[in-house]
Image (spheres, rainbow, N blue to C red):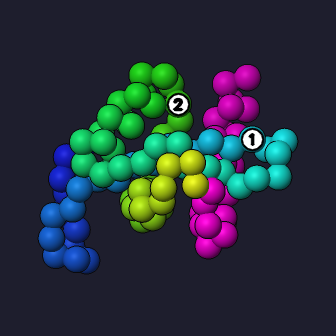
Amino acid sequence: MSRFFDFRKRRFTRPAAAALQYDPLKPEPPVVLASGKGRVAEEIVRIARERNIPLFEDGALADALSRLELNESIPSELYAVVAEVLVFVYRLDARRA
């Protein structure tokens, strides 16, 4: 991962990444386990790849999640987008099984 040029903002931006934890058997929404930008984002992605954790790329979502505190539940405004991530992960899990 490296800096990339965002043509909409007309400037270079640093990549963002976040890791979520979610238990579908509990009523709580997903929680941010790790988040960051730049080198921290690169490390989150490296660890995920190393542990074969599925990666879902959505720059706007990663940016929004990287602004949250660790162990903070995602806000309701992000439920629909995070649901897409969960569907993606569940489909990958189903293929692996």
Q: On the rendered structure, is 51 left or right of 82?
A: left
- Name the magenta segment's main secondary structure: helix
Quadrant where the C terminus sits is top right
Q: Amino acid at mark 1?
A: Asp
Task: Name the residue rendered at 50%, 25% in the picture.
Answer: 52
Magenta range is 73-97
Residue carrying label 2: 53
Which secondary structure lies at badge 2? loop
Residue carrying label 1: 23
Q: Amino acid at mark 2?
A: Ile
The disc, 1 or 2, on the residue closer to the chain's N-terminal end is: 1
Task: Name the residue rendered at 62%, 42% in the picture.
Answer: 21
Residue 75 falls inside the magenta stretch: yes
Task: Name the residue rendered at 82%, 45% in the picture.
Answer: 26
Front residue of 33 and 4: 33
Residue 60, x across and y down, in percent: 42, 65
Residue 20 falls inside the magenta stretch: no
> Would residue 56 be visible to someone looking at this image?
no
Front residue of 63 and 67: 67
